[in-house]
Image (cartoon, rainbow, N blue to C red):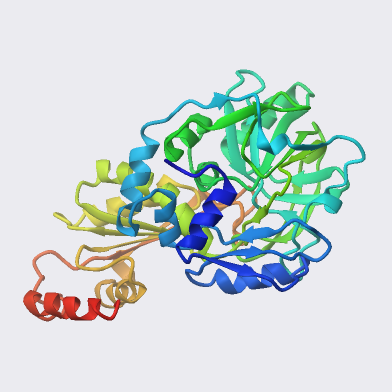
């Protein structure tokens, strides 16, 4: 079960017609990113850039930018992705230490120069420079030894220096504890991993055992090896691992960089000093293109399932939940039994996660995966003077440029459900069921 490494996954995607291999030589400065921008506007194939100007190392991107590829990752169908994800998430498997790690076939400890080894991309015209966007940061709680892994943006700052923006609660707390003792925090940065480990890194799992979660999602123990220069175990089958430490009491300007919000952000971030570069003999460098449909698909899968389970426990009439991270929106459908239910659902959804800025609740006759139907429900079942909820003064998305100082903002909710007792007035037009079923069978012949 699962995929051995990134190359194994890419081979499967090639067999399934879900990978394009680009032979033209492209510059890591803007040109590769420009292709990924085009691919990221809708569900499109993954891309392997085989000739990168100035490097022998290929670049892979848009790895999880379609529901079909998410289904391939879990060996299931697109309709059952969320169910399979929740099933695997509930059965964690402890990692396993191994003595041999392919990622340690080549080890560089002297005269480290990241830019000479890795084809780190520059994505946008106003970016300050190259950024590693798919670096999985492995670190330990300096007090308890508990492990975590997450994805954080990394700015190339020098031959062996990176800026790191820590935004998750777990990683921020681990570094805070180390810095309080005036100690560096040792980390390992994995680049180019199998898809379930990649999904693990972006899953909302505060202070949980993410290495155990990775085993559960992958269906077998995550294989780890001891780091060569740090006391952090590293994923044995990653393409590349950078070993280093986050320096205490050091902050430097990070950015501007085009973030997943669709805007350039500049922050003050800690700094990582790299001690070693480890990689396989023929590695592949993998990237996320910020502000793409891949963002939405991955986070919808990794956060929606858990969110639905929690909201369903509070709102039994909840039929479906969809999270759109590009718009920071939660879409819900319910079969309401009283007029207070939609408003309660809105409050719960808005408080569930700081990244949710707006929530919309509709009836269960509305397909929340069809934007046209959601817009129709808002246009015909929502009256702003009585169906709008605004909550000020809440913790907000730190990447939102409209937030107030201290990452404080407001949130809104829209009740676009029809009034109880007025079902006929708001009945959705449709052909008879038998005719609709027959039409569906006919169109299947045309793959529609």
Q: Is residue 291 depicted above or below 379 in this figure?
A: above
Residue 216 seen by the camera: yes
Percent from the top left, x then y, of residue 328? 48, 59
Residue 357 seen by the camera: no
Where the N terminus falls, by quadrant? top left
Percent from the top left, x then y, of residue 267? 74, 51
Q: Nearer the viewer, residue 39 or 411?
A: 39
| Residue plotted at (39% across, 50% down) | 304
**Left or right side of 192 for 269:** right
**Left or right side of 99 for 81:** left
Percent from the top left, x then y, of residue 276? 81, 36
Q: Is residue 29 depicted above or below 9 in this figure?
A: below
Where the C terminus falls, by quadrant? bottom left
| Residue plotted at (78% across, 34% down) | 244
Q: Is residue 198 depicted above or below 335 in this figure?
A: above
Task: Tell me how many marks there are.
Answer: 0
Q: Is residue 128 depicted above or below 25 in this figure?
A: above
Q: Nearer the viewer, residue 103 or 165?
A: 103
Residue 441: quadrant of the picture = bottom left
| Residue plotted at (26% across, 60% down) | 333
**Left or right side of 300 for 148:** right
Q: Nearer the viewer, residue 203 or 445?
A: 445
Residue 278: quadrant of the picture = top right
Residue 434: quadrant of the picture = bottom left
* Residue, far right: 111
């Amino acid at each position: 079960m699962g995929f051995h490494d990134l190359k194994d996954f890419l081979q499967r995607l090639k067999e399934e017609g879900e990978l394009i291999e680009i032979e033209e030589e492209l510059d890591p400065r803007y040109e590769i990113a420009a292709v990924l921008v085009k691919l990221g506007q809708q569900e499109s194939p993954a891309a392997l850039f085989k000739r990168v100007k100035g490097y022998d190392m290929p670049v892979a991107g848009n790895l999880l930018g379609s529901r079909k590829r998410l289904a391939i990752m879990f060996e299931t169908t697109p309709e059952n992705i969320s169910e399979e994800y929740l099933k695997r998430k509930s059965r964690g498997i402890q990692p396993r230490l191994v003595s041999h790690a392919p990622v340690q076939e080549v080890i560089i400890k002297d005269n480290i120069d990241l830019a000479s080894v890795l084809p780190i991309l520059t994505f946008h015209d106003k970016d300050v420079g190259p950024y590693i966007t798919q670096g999985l940061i492995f670190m330990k709680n300096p007090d308890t030894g508990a492990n975590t892994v997450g994805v954080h943006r990394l700015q190339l700052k020098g031959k062996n220096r990176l800026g790191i923006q820590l935004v998750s609660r777990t990683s921020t707390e681990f570094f805070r504890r180390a810095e309080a003792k005036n100690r560096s925090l040792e980390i390992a940065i994995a680049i180019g991993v199998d898809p379930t480990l990649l999904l693990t890194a972006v899953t909302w799992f505060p202070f949980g055992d993410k290495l155990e979660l990775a085993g559960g999602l992958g269906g077998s123990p995550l294989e780890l090896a001891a780091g060569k220069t740090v006391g952090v175990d590293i994923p044995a089958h990653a393409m590349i691992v950078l070993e280093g430490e986050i320096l205490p009491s050091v902050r430097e300007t990070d950015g501007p960089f085009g973030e997943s919000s669709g805007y350039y952000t500049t922050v003050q971030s800690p700094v990582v000093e790299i001690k070693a570069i480890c990689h396989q003999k023929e590695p592949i460098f993998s990237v996320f293109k910020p502000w793409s449909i891949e963002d939405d698909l991955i986070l919808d899968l990794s956060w929606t399932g858990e969110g639905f389970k929690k909201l369903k426990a509070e709102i039994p009439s909840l039929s479906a939940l969809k999270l759109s991270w590009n718009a920071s929106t939660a879409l819900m459908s319910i079969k309401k039994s009283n007029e207070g239910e939609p408003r309660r659902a809105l409050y719960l959804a808005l408080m569930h996660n700081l990244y949710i800025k707006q929530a919309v609740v509709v009836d269960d006759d509305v397909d929340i995966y069809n934007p046209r139907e959601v817009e129709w429900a808002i246009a015909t079942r929502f009256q702003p003077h009585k169906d709008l909820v605004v909550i000020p003064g809440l913790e907000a998305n730190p990447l939102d440029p409209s937030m107030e100082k201290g990452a404080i903002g407001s949130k809104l909710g829209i009740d676009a459900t029809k009034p109880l007792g007025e079902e006929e007035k708001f009945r959705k037009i449709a052909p008879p069921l038998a005719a609709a079923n027959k039409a569906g069978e006919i169109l299947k012949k045309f793959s529609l």
